[in-house]
Image (cartoon, rainbow, N blue to C red):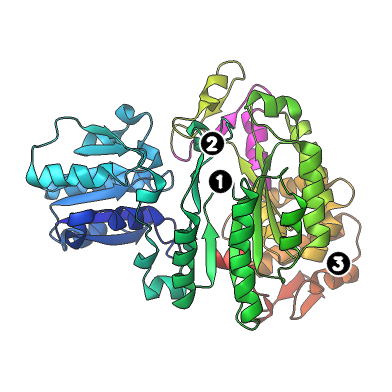
């Protein structure tokens, strides 16, 4: 093969949609192009050896915030051992602030933005001439109908074992300054009939898990209804053959027609990711986020009470102008609404995003290395931000994991943020760790915490036991759970 498309995925179950788009749009070069995906954490020498086994003339890398450091090492080694191979970079991480990045200096060419048209043209020029003079090539955005859809390039192995990423549209009309989509002018839909035909083909091949990467799935409700009806038809025709679909919703836009459709889905079929980010109107205004908080809260409450959808709701700590007390009020409000998962994230300064304009006025200090997490602001010092980071990690282990549902409700009480922060601070002093805490040890620690807060040993053990299919014994060392007793993770965690 002459052209090799490669990236390092965060995990095996993630299949790169971007590489498949490039392959689908290679035109006359498609027969000379192949994909080689890897997973982060592999040895650089092994990756380079496997790349060169294809004997490529061109290698194109998809570069993202989660793989840029490892990809930089791969490119550096590749150019040392095979300098004749032309390296082209693309992806969001190298599309902005390109000139100051080490990986861009190592590569031969960089395509910024959309690569569907620009990458194949650049490859053709490299192979056939005239040789490109410029190193950085701004991606040309074609009409959506002219972009070849990539879904036939998902292999049978992908369908059987990996998350299938799909998109009915690209872009976003909103201008939230912490998000790269704020740089888009609008959202651009793909022709719906062709997209649905591709979904039909995937379903016919056995695909049952679809993750939509659209930033605003419910922006055009007529389109949303047609896509959801596609899945409803499959569920109704094959009630014993479950389908799972994940969508990202605009939180304050849920008209009655969409509610009626959502209410028809059975448990386990739908997950909605809803970005609240902050409930503070002043903070929202600072970062150019338009959101009707009352409507958003009403919609989340309705989804929790009147649908069987799994909700994953996002909050961001460290936004300019927001202190811990404000974030805590937003967190407590979300808990009261009943969402199954609250994703507690820490602000990241993604390359190219307008959030940088607040750096000086709000004392924003960011980690210079990926994922560029905020370390401190003028309202949250470094030590406090580290406490929030640990809170987020323990929240995932205890609350979002789905393993401690009944126990979590008791732990949170009537002051969720305050009570869980106290637990977070305590468990860190006991473990000095936020990762690699075995489940049985975590259960024992949770029981110990409940007892410290005044619950007797038997009651604490019984509460923990109510969260497991197996047996938890309350002994001298607290709760103990056998591995066989661990319940299945929620669908999202199986799919992630």
Residue designated by label 1: 215
Asked if 365 appears above or below 246 in the picture, the reply is: above
Asked if 58 appears above or below 206 in the picture, the reply is: above
* Residue 68: % across, % down: 36, 44
Between 423 and 275, the residue placed more toward the observer is: 275
Q: Is 200 one of the magenta-colored residues?
A: no
Mark 1 and mark 2 in contact (Cβ < 8 Å)?
Answer: yes
Q: Quadrant of residue 368?
A: top left
Q: Residues under labels 3 and 2: Cα distance?
A: 42 Å
Which is more foreground, mark 1 or mark 3? 1
**Mark toward the start of the polypeptide (1 vs 3):** 1
Asked if 413 appears above or below 106 in the picture, the reply is: below
**Mark toward the start of the polypeptide (3 vs 2):** 2
Category of crowding for the residue at label 3, using alpha-carbon neighbours closer than 10 angstroms: few (below 14), some (14–19), many (at least 20) = many
Mark 3 and mark 1 in contact (Cβ < 8 Å)?
Answer: no
Give left or right: position of 282 versus 96. right
The magenta segment: 370-391
At 82% across and 43% down in the image, what residue appears? 333
Q: Which mark is residue 330?
A: none
Numbered disc 3: secondary structure: helix
Give left or right: position of 340 versus 66. right
Between 297 and 189, the residue placed more toward the observer is: 189
Numbered disc 1: secondary structure: loop
Residue designated by label 2: 179
Residue designated by label 3: 460
Numbered disc 2: secondary structure: loop
């Amino acid at each position: 093969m002459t052209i090799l498309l490669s990236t390092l995925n965060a995990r095996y179950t993630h299949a790169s949609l971007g590489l498949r788009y490039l392959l689908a749009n290679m035109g006359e070069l498609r027969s000379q192009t192949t994909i080689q995906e890897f997973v982060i954490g592999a040895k650089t020498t092994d990756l380079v050896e496997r790349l060169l086994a294809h004997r490529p003339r061109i290698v194109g890398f998809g570069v993202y915030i989660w793989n840029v450091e490892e990809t930089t090492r791969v490119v550096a080694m590749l150019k040392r051992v095979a300098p004749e191979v032309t390296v082209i970079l693309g992806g969001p991480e190298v599309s902005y602030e390109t000139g100051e990045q080490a990986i861009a200096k190592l590569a031969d060419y960089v395509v910024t933005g959309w690569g569907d048209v620009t990458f194949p043209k650049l490859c053709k020029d490299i192979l056939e001439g005239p040789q490109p003079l410029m190193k950085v090539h701004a991606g040309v955005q074609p009409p959506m109908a002219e972009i070849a859809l990539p879904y036939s390039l998902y292999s049978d192995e992908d369908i059987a074992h990996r998350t299938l990423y799909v998109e009915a549209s690209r872009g976003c009309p909103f201008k939230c300054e912490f998000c790269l989509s704020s740089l888009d002018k609008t959202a651009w839909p793909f022709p719906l009939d062709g997209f649905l035909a591709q979904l039909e083909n995937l379903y016919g091949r056995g695909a049952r898990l679809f993750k939509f990467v659209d930033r605003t799935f419910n922006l055009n409700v007529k389109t949303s209804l047609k896509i959801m009806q596609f899945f409803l038809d499959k569920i109704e025709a094959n009630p014993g053959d479950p389908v799972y679909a994940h969508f990202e919703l605009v939180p304050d836009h849920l008209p009655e027609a969409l509610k009626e459709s959502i209410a028809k889905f059975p448990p386990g079929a739908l997950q909605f990711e809803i970005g609240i980010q902050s409930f503070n109107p002043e903070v929202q205004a600072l970062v150019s986020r338009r959101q009707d908080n009352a409507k958003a809260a009403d919609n989340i409450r309705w989804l929790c009470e009147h649908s069987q959808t799994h909700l994953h709701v996002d909050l961001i700590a460290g936004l300019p102008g927001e202190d811990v007390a404000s974030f805590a009020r937003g967190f407590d409000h979300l808990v009261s609404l009943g969402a199954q998962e609250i994703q507690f994230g820490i602000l990241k300064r993604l390359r190219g995003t307008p959030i940088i304009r607040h750096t000086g006025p709000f004392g924003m200090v960011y980690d210079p290395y990926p994922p560029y997490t905020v370390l401190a602001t003028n309202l949250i010092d470094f030590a406090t931000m580290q406490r929030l980071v640990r809170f987020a990690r323990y929240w995932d282990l205890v609350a979002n994991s789905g393993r401690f549902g009944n126990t979590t409700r008791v732990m949170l009480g009537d002051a969720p943020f305050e009570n869980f922060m106290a637990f977070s601070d305590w468990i860190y002093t006991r473990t000095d760790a936020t990762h690699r805490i075995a489940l049985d040890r975590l259960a024992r620690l949770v029981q110990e915490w409940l007892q410290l807060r005044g619950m007797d040993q038997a009651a604490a053990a019984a509460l923990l036991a109510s969260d497991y299919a197996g047996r938890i014994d309350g002994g001298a060392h607290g709760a103990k759970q056998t591995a066989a007793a661990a319940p299945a993770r929620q669908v999202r965690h199986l799919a992630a």
